[in-house]
Amino acid sequence: MNIYEQYLQEFNSKIELTDFLLSFLVATLFSIVLYLFYIRFANPLSNRKRFAQIFLPLALTTMLIITVVKSSLALSLGLVGALSIVRFRTAIKDPEELTYLFLCIALGLMTGANQLVIAIIGFPTILLMIGIYKYTTGRVRVKYDDKMLLSIQSEATELQPLIDAISQELPHVELKRYTQDTSGIDLTLACKIDSVAQLDTIKKELDQIAPNTRISVIKQPDIIA
């Protein structure tokens, strides 16, 4: 039997139900572990729990695709054509989010290809290395709820009154970006905000300086040391 015939035979092999269920179980278990790990250690811009909810379906979907495709040469070629017309329009705002998505896909690939030994050894090892790196670099999440990125768009013509109004209400304010043109001032500030009431007070004071002031708040864990 030549190499080409062996190649075709591997593609035409049947899917064993026992192997599939075991791969499904491993993918599910590790997806849940990754979900908990991401919530504990990640520092994303988006909501942790909401983003981490896609880990399980992403890993299982990848596993199912690889499980089916690996048993058929025709399906594998068809998958290449199908994926060539798929377009994802959702932008990934944080490279860290993309890293965890690749981990989910890698988990699905390993379990779908029945490389369970590699998955059981490699996947926890990667998470362990990430956890060690977070601890050694001091990037483990302790309390991030008060660290925010405050974006302000105002029709005011002077910067100092805006800074003074914000500094009176917040315990910590750092100027990160400042742009001024004919339409007004655009500010980005790193702040520590203790309560929503402070934001409401700031909005009222800024409106007194310049009406129609717009405020945007984004949780940003590492913006303040």
Image: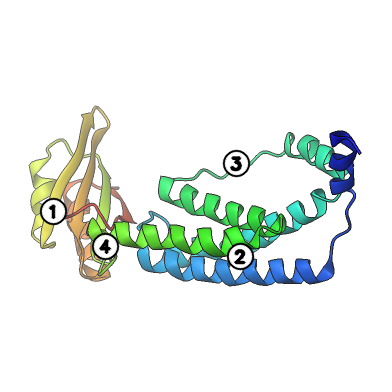
**Residue type at tag 1:** Val
| Tag shown at residue 104 | none
Q: Which residue is mark 3?
A: 89
Point out the tag, 4 or 1, that comes first from the N-terminus. 4
Residue 205 horizontal side relative to residue 149, left or right: left
Q: Are the residues at dot 1 and dot 3 in contact (C-beta closer than 8 Å)? A: no
Residue 42, can we see it?
no
**Given the image, on which type of amino acid does mark 3 rest?**
Arg
In the image, what residue type sits under mark 2? Leu
Judge from the rendering whether residue 153 lies leftward or rightward of residue 123; answer left or right: left
Q: Report which residue position mark 1 lands on.
A: 173
Would residue 147 appear left or right of 175 to someone viewing this image? right
| Residue at image coords 57%, 56% | 104
Secondary structure beneath dot 3 equals loop
User: Mark 1 or mark 3: which is in front?
Assistant: 3
Q: Where is residue 80 shown, x and y percent of the image? A: 77, 37
- Out of 5 and 107, give the one closest to the viewer: 5
| Numbered mark located on residue 56 in the image | 2
Whole-number angstrom distance, CA of label 1 to CA of label 3: 35 Å
Q: Position of residue 82 (x, y in %)?
A: 79, 39
